[in-house]
Image: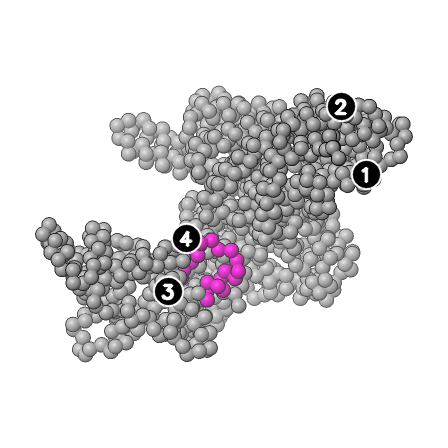
């Protein structure tokens, strides 16, 4: 099963990693479509959810490169992009649920003026949207930290995998994660 | 204090605090507070955040799946839209979905009519700037094309949800290959059909649109047999000056790799010839039922590849493919295989192969030229496509160089070259104008100059665009297609008549038009126009120097292409001198590199290896200055230098050069592994020369592994690798291995008609001779001699070595009779004389030839045999040093150790 017949994704990944914006946006499209198709497959195969994001991103990677040679810079770029796609998918979803339930965008939704407390699911959605916004701010100041959050949290990559991917020590990554977490939670608290 | 915006200061302090056990943090905070209370407060807040729990700790859980499921549902909304209206159009059913858009069959009801059409709408969530730009560009491109064989744009707008859409003609039909099969079209009908497609593409090209994604799926034929060209989704505007547009050019080459032209796969400049290639593939498929086999998708760097692999011939493919493939192509009425192969062979085959040339400049320049030649074939007239002439080969040889001056053949003739130059000038001029404005003090003069240049460039651009717009074939000749040459000649007349007031522009365009005519084969006319331009440039003073230098270099390449090597050298030297005076700016450095490259090639043509090496050295120096000493792009230069050092038997220098090439190449993480095969085999050859045989073998085998893993089995570099191994094993007296390697090298080179064929055959012959099989060796060496005569240069020392080997083989193969002895000795002595005359008495061919002379003397039992052996040994010592294994081996042979 190939993501889309006739497309050499290995080359696409390389081009995207080389700074080719068109290739990158094309790859983003492909990832978005492919992740969705695969999610449906998973749904049919099993009801398990744990580690879902991780297996998805990995599986998409394996399908896309199909044994082709991918340099380490390209691999990094791929997983960064795939994690970003996952973030986009999850956030789009949360945003839509919020606006569907309330009939308007989350931006108009003052937390303290809600007539009744939000359901846990709604709270999770809001929390995610806030996290996304905080992550956007973090990216302005420390792109490395925000990328790490994307890879680990949204992309579902475990620290040892990220360490191998980026060629850095697991210990360093965990320290960075601790910093990112502190900073994001602090930011969430301030913004709320 | 906002933690995010003071992050840089806080980060280190926070890290240090987090590393402390919680109980000691407070005292550290107190220390900080003493000097910076605000920072301490923020840090305290941050530390408090550590204990919090939030979304990062809960993970995403089921959300990913929910999100993806929901996204799938969102996609399904398309189907729910059925029956809805977008503008005046009612959605009937979805008919496809691309990466960015969805496609519906739609219907519009009017008074007494209903019209069906295809509506393309941007997919939900795909509204990034880049995608939007591409979507709108497709619409814009379709809007400017109005041709019966191009799906027409009917309408467009923004739907209720804010997504842009456009509506185009809906074509109900089959793709062209299926259509031909379903209707059992005969050869003539197929060619007519494809000719129509070419004309539609030609029309787009005249409107400066390159389709870039022509494939059967984008060429539908309706029930009336009319073809329709679809999907300009990744088309490119040739006049597009947007640098991002070029990026798109690179990125989207990936859409349909099976139909992509080599330059698309390589991410190089795309032009009208790119569509010609795709049309050639369509034609191939229509004839043979499949795409050409053995199309090499791997990296093939034009600067290092010895010989680009040509596409296989259609007639051979027809003879070879399965019946099922032919049925697939021809439907019910499969023509007799042999008859079809014969009809396709000859002129039609030449048309296909011309369209499918690897190098764009060797293809038909435009779809119109291809259409015209198909017309010639159908009318039984002589076709324009020519087999390679000597001049063409030389031209190709010259154009195979890196600086891109050879890109002259790209696109719609000189007009577009002029256009490209003008656009480039305009951009430069704009940048200069901006620069001038920044430097206020002496700004006024500079600004005026820059503006004058920008204006001139703009004038040129407008002029060229107006030329192209007036070049509508229907208008020009009452329906008959204008030939490309006519088109350029018409442009030339306008240059003469209308540009008298702007002599510099006129002169530049004279040169451009001349170069266009030359690339179209109107060599004489083109050259005289180019010369007129050059004479005018000479009269215009320093302002014209840059244009003059580049024109001189173009003329030089033309001279060499026509075999006027001396003239070419003189012109290149003049160009080089002017470029040198112009200073060290990037463009002039590039100009110098171009001229030096031509001079290096000229030296190569002449067999002047030392001259070639000197030029490659200068090119390397210039490029090092331009790029810095560690730039991976210098690998090509080191490689060239290594190759020329090898030819001079300067093994030390060669080894150094290849090692440097490998070093800089390794700095490029993106460098395709296959390139290392070139560098490692070069180093292996150098190490063989140095007598470091074990290292040489390791390198050669490593090169072979890389090449076999990353390239196709007949790649020219594999021939070189086997040839080096063969020579190495021959020196080591490992004759069976040597012969196996040489045989493989010969086989590959024979398939490729590579110029190295003669040399590899010679190696094989020498091995057979050493193995004591002179009769076989004689046959092999005779073939080598014949190939050497047609493919290479008799000035090369290797040629005379071959002649001597031939003499020796003749001697050993026959029962010794006096006349043959004399002939054989004469042949060898002649070879020695020729080498002496060419002052080639320091290289390997000289030493080896002395060895043949000695062997001949031994076979004839003449008294002078030991003297020849001594001479051979001296030559080898001088060449290789006293401790080289080959020297040791010869010493052992002539002085057998005491028993």
In the image, which residues are magenta? A59-88
Q: CA distance from mark 4 to mark 1?
A: 63 Å
Chain ID of residue with mark 2: B
* Residue A123 quadrant: bottom left
Q: Can you give x and y, in whole percent of width and height, for residue B861 in the image?
A: 84, 28
Q: Magenta region's main secondary structure?
A: helix
Q: Secondary structure at mark 1?
A: helix
In this view, B552 is above or below B403: above
Residue closer to the observer: B53 or B348: B53
Q: Which residue is mark 2?
A: B867
Residue B286 shows in this picture: yes
Q: CA distance from mark 3 to mark 4?
A: 28 Å
Residue closer to the observer: B205 or B325: B325
Q: CA distance from mark 2 to mark 4?
A: 71 Å
The mark found on residue B774 in the picture is 1
Q: CA distance from mark 1 to mark 3?
A: 68 Å
In this view, B777 is above or below B212: above
* Dot 2 and dot 1 within a common chain: yes
Q: Residue B310: within the magenta?
A: no
Look at 30% across and 73% down and name the residue there.
Answer: A97
Residue closer to the observer: B700 or B259: B700
* Residue B785 quadrant: top right
* Dot 4 and dot 1 within a common chain: no
The mark found on residue A21 in the picture is 4
* Dot 1 and dot 3 within a common chain: no
Q: Residues within 10 Å of mark 3 (few under 14, many from 20)?
A: some
Q: Which residue is mark 3?
A: A158
């Amino acid at each position: 099963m190939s993501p889309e017949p006739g497309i050499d994704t290995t080359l696409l990944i390389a081009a995207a990693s080389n700074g080719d914006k068109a290739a990158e946006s094309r790859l983003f499209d492909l990832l978005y479509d492919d992740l969705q198709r695969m999610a449906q497959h998973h749904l049919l195969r099993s009801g398990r959810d744990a580690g879902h994001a991780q297996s998805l991103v990995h599986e998409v990677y394996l399908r896309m490169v199909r044994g082709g040679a991918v340099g380490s810079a390209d691999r990094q770029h791929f997983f960064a992009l795939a994690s970003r796609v996952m973030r986009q998918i999850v956030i789009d979803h949360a945003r839509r649920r919020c606006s569907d339930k309330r009939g308007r965008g989350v931006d108009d939704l003052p937390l303290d003026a809600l007539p009744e407390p939000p359901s846990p699911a709604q709270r999770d959605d809001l929390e995610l949207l806030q996290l996304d916004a905080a992550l956007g701010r973090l990216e302005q100041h420390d792109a490395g930290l925000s990328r790490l959050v994307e890879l680990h949290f949204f992309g579902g990559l475990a620290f040892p995998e990220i360490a191998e991917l980026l060629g850095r020590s697991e210990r360093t990554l965990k320290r960075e994660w601790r910093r990112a977490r502190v900073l994001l939670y602090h930011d969430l608290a301030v913004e709320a | 204090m906002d933690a995010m915006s003071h992050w840089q200061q806080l980060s280190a302090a926070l890290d240090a605090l987090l590393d402390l056990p919680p109980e000691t943090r407070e005292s550290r905070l107190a220390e900080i507070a003493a000097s910076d209370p605000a920072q301490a407060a923020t840090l305290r807040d941050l530390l408090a955040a550590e204990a919090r729990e939030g979304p990062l700790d809960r993970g995403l859980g089921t959300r990913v799946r929910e999100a993806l499921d929901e996204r799938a549902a969102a996609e399904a909304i398309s189907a729910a839209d059925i029956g809805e209206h977008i503008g005046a159009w009612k959605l009937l059913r979805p008919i496809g979905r691309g990466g960015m858009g969805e496609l519906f069959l739609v219907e519009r009801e009017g008074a007494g009519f209903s019209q069906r059409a295809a509506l393309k709408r941007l997919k939900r969530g795909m509204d990034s700037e880049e995608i939007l730009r591409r979507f709108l560009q497709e619409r814009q491109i379709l809007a400017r094309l109005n041709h019966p064989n191009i799906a027409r744009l009917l309408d467009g707008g923004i739907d209720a949800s804010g997504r842009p859409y456009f509506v185009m003609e809906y074509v109900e039909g089959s793709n062209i290959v299926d259509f031909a099969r379903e209707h059992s079209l005969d050869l003539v009908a197929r060619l007519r059909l494809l000719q129509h497609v070419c004309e539609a593409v030609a029309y787009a090209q005249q409107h400066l649109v390159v389709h870039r994604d022509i494939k059967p799926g984008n060429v539908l034929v309706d029930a009336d047999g009319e073809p329709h060209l679809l999907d300009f989704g990744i088309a490119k505007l040739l006049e597009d000056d947007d640098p991002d547009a070029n990026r798109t050019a690179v990125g989207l080459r990936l859409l349909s790799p099976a139909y992509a032209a080599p330059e698309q796969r390589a991410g190089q400049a795309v032009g009208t010839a790119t569509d010609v290639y795709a049309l050639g593939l369509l034609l191939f498929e229509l004839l043979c039922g499949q795409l050409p086999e053995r199309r090499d998708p791997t990296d093939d760097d034009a600067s290092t590849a010895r010989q680009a692999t040509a596409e296989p011939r259609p007639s051979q493919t027809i003879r070879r493919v399965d019946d099922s493939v032919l049925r697939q192509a021809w439907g019910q009425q499969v023509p007799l295989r042999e008859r079809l192969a014969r009809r396709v062979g000859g002129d039609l085959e030449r048309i296909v192969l011309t369209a499918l040339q690897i190098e764009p400049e060797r293809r038909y320049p435009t779809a119109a030229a291809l259409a015209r030649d198909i017309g010639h074939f159908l009318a039984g007239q002589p076709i324009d496509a020519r087999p390679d002439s000597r001049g063409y080969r030389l031209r190709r040889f010259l154009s195979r160089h890196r600086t891109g001056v050879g890109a002259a053949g790209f696109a719609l003739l000189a007009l577009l070259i002029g256009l490209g130059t003008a656009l480039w000038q305009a951009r430069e001029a704009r940048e200069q104008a901006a620069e001038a404005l920044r430097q206020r003090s002496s700004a006024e003069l500079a600004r005026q100059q820059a503006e004058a240049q920008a204006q001139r460039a703009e004038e040129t651009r407008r002029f060229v665009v107006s030329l192209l717009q007036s070049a509508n074939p229907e208008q020009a000749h009452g329906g008959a297609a204008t030939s490309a040459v006519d088109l350029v000649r018409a442009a030339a007349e306008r240059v003469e008549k209308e540009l008298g007031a702007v002599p510099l522009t006129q002169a530049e365009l004279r040169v451009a038009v001349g170069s266009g005519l030359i690339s179209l084969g109107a060599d004489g006319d083109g050259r005289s126009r180019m010369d007129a331009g050059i004479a005018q440039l000479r009269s215009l003073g320093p302002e014209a120097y840059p244009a003059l230098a580049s024109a001189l270099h173009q003329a030089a390449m033309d001279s060499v292409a026509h075999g006027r090597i001396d003239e070419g050298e003189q012109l290149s030297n003049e160009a080089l001198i002017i470029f040198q005076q112009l200073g060290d700016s990037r463009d002039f450095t590039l100009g110098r590199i171009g001229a030096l490259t031509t001079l290096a090639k000229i030296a190569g043509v002449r067999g002047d290896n030392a001259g070639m090496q000197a030029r490659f050295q200068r090119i390397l120096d210039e490029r090092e200055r331009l790029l810095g000493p560690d730039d991976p792009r210098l690998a090509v230069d080191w490689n060239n230098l290594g190759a020329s050092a090898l030819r001079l038997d300067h093994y030390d220098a060669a080894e150094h050069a290849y090692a440097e090439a490998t070093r800089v190449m390794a700095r490029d993480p993106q460098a395709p592994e296959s390139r290392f095969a070139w560098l490692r085999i070069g180093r292996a050859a150098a190490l063989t020369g140095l007598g470091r045989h074990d290292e040489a073998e390791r390198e050669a085998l490593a090169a072979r592994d890389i090449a076999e893993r990353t390239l196709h089995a007949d790649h020219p570099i594999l021939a070189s690798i086997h040839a080096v191994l063969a020579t190495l094993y021959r020196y080591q007296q490992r004759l069976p291995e040597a012969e196996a390697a040489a045989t493989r090298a010969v086989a590959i080179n024979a398939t490729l008609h590579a110029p190295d064929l003669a040399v590899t055959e010679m190696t094989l012959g020498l091995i057979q001779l050493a193995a004591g099989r002179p009769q076989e060796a004689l046959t092999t060496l005779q073939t080598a001699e014949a190939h050497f005569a047609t493919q290479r240069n008799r000035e090369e020392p290797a040629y005379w070595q071959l002649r001597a080997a031939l003499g020796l083989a003749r001697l050993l193969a026959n029962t010794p009779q006096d006349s043959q002895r004399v002939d054989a000795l004469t042949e060898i002595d002649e070879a020695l004389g020729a080498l002496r005359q060419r002052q080639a008495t320091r290289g390997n061919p000289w030493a080896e030839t002395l060895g043949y002379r000695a062997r001949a003397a031994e076979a004839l039992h003449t008294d002078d045999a030991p003297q020849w052996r001594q001479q051979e040994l001296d030559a080898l010592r001088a060449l290789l040093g006293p401790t080289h294994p080959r020297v040791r081996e010869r010493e052992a042979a002539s002085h057998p150790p005491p028993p």
